[in-house]
Amino acid sequence: MTAAQVTLCFLLRNAADGEYVLLGTKKTGFGRGKVVGVGGHLEKGETAEQAACREVMEEISVVVAPEDLVPAGTVDFVFPARPEWNMATTVFLTRAWDGEPIESVEIAPAWFPVDRLPVERMWADAEHWLPAMISGQRIAVRVALAADNENVADVRTEAWVGPV
């Protein structure tokens, strides 16, 4: 089965007490109840950049321009017990946007200190790649989930050679 093409976009900001990342509690659908990044599936004919900008607007009512997206890498999620859940994800970071994040039907956004991510409320794989990408590492990650579709069975990381 072919993996779904998806994007994630992490908004970053600096404050007097450190760096913060915008995450959100998923209110509906896949991953409901987990703290996740903003993003979703590419629509037919969309680039990953276009999808990231659209998803940010739909989920948190913030405008991100494609030229403000910083490619951070890719994460391929493999669910051996549920291959229809497999995802090929392009990850972006941004420090520029217009508007203030607001809650939608799908997600309740909140700012978290980068050095204290709420990993206990996130998918188990996030701690294996998100801090590295936020810190500027450009990586390609392959995450294989365990049979319970929750825990991580295997993580492989390599340098990512993507767009500049």
Image (cartoon, helix red, strand yellow):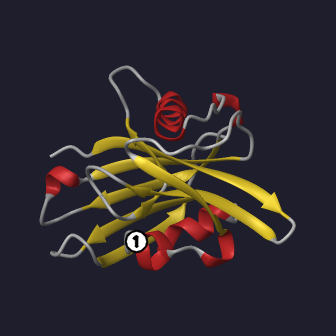
Image coordinates of residue 21 in percent, x first then y, are: 64, 60
Towards the viewer: 3 or 14? 14
> Is residue 82 depicted above or below 96 in this figure?
below
Q: How many marks?
A: 1
Identified at 38% across, 55% down, the residue is 26
The picture places residue 1, in percent across and down from the top left corner, at 14, 46
Q: Is residue 42 visible?
A: yes
Crowding at dot 1, Cα within 10 Å, few <14 / some 14-19 / many 20+, comes out as many
Q: Nearer the viewer, residue 155 or 11?
A: 11
Residue 135 located left or right of residue 40: right
Q: Quadrant of residue 116?
A: bottom right
Q: Is residue 162 above or below residue 24?
A: above
Q: Residue at x 66, y 70 (%)?
A: 114
Left or right of residue 150: residue 138: right
Relative to the observer, which residue lies in front, 90 or 16?
16
Secondary structure, mark 1, is loop
Q: Nearer the viewer, residue 10 or 106?
A: 106
Question: Mark 1 sits on what residue?
Answer: 125
Where residue 102 sits, quadrant-wise, is: top right
Residue displayed at 51% across by 36% down: 52
x 69%, y 35%: residue: 99
Whole-percent x, y for residue 138 in the image: 62, 58
| Rendered-image quadrant of the C terminus | top right
Tell me which corner region of the image, top left, top right, bottom left or bottom right, holds residue 106.
top left
Residue at the right extreme of this rendering: 16
Residue type pointed to by label 1:
Asp
Q: Is residue 137 visible?
A: no
* Residue 80 percent across, percent down from the top left: 16, 65
In the rendered image of this protein, does residue 87 appear above or below residue 35? above
